[in-house]
Amino acid sequence: MCSETVAIANDHAGVELKALLVKDLEALGLRVLDLGANTAESVDYPDFAVRVVEAIVNGAADRGVLICGTGIGMGMAANRTRGIRAAVCHDAVSARLAREHNDANVLALGARTLGPEVARDCLKVFLSTAFDGGPRHVRRLQKLQ
Ligand code: RB5
């Protein structure tokens, strides 16, 4: 498992799942930057996605986790910034391939579309899988830039 800082944020839909995932991150010995939201009050997901994006861009975090109802809004918001590669993952396979092929640095999860154990599995695989590298994947990522 990697030794690094993980920034995590969510909207109102993701409060409970975030609490679960923060425990998993801490149990893995990772430093966690919990950037909200921590109440059920309705909030706007872009306001929280940008916190994680800025933490990564500023070097305060190595990777990020974003949670909303579906993961989709968070993924869209995060991917507006150069250098952020957010992947909405639905299972261990998508989490693994997001790392191996896409070198994803943000995991976006849907609290309303995933069971908690599936989400935990996505996180574990996301953190423990390396980028495959190699000319074809690197070339494609360069085109994203
Ligand atoms: C909030 O109701 C919901 O729209 C949000 O959590 C997310 O699913 C958006 O993509």
Image: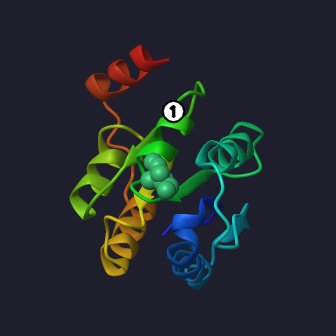
Quadrant of residue 140 within the rendered picture: top left
Indicate left or right for 17 with 8 as reference. left
* Residue in the image at 32% along x and 42% along y: 132
Q: Position of residue 106 (x, y in %)?
A: 51, 48
> In the depicted view, which residue is nearer to us: 47 or 65?
47
SS assignment at label 1: loop
Q: Position of residue 83 (x, y in %)?
A: 57, 29
* Disc 1 residue lies near ligand 1 with CB under 8 A: no
Question: Exactly how many numbered labels are in the figure?
Answer: 1
Residue appearing at x 73%, y 40% in the figure: 54
Residue 119 image offset from top left, x and y in percent: 37, 70
Q: Quadrant of residue 25?
A: bottom right
**Residue at position x 68%, y 67% in the image:** 41
Q: Position of residue 45 (x, y in %)?
A: 59, 49
In the figure, is residue 115 to the left or right of 21? Answer: left
Instruction: Please determine whether, in this image, residue 124 is positioned above or below residue 90.
Output: below
List the single residue furthest toward the front. 42
Q: Is residue 114 visible?
A: yes
**Scheme by which the image is coloured:** rainbow
Q: Residue at x 25, y 63 (%)?
A: 91
Visible residue check, residue 107: no
- The residue that mark 1 highlights is 79
**CA neighbours of label 1 inside 10 A, class few (<14), some (14 to 19), many (20+):** some
In the image, 7 versus 27, the foreground residue is 7
82 is higher (above) or lower (below) than 18:
above
137 or 112, which lies in front? 112
Furthest residue in direction top, as rendered: 143
Mark 1: amino acid: Asn
* Residue lying at the far left of the rendered structure: 93
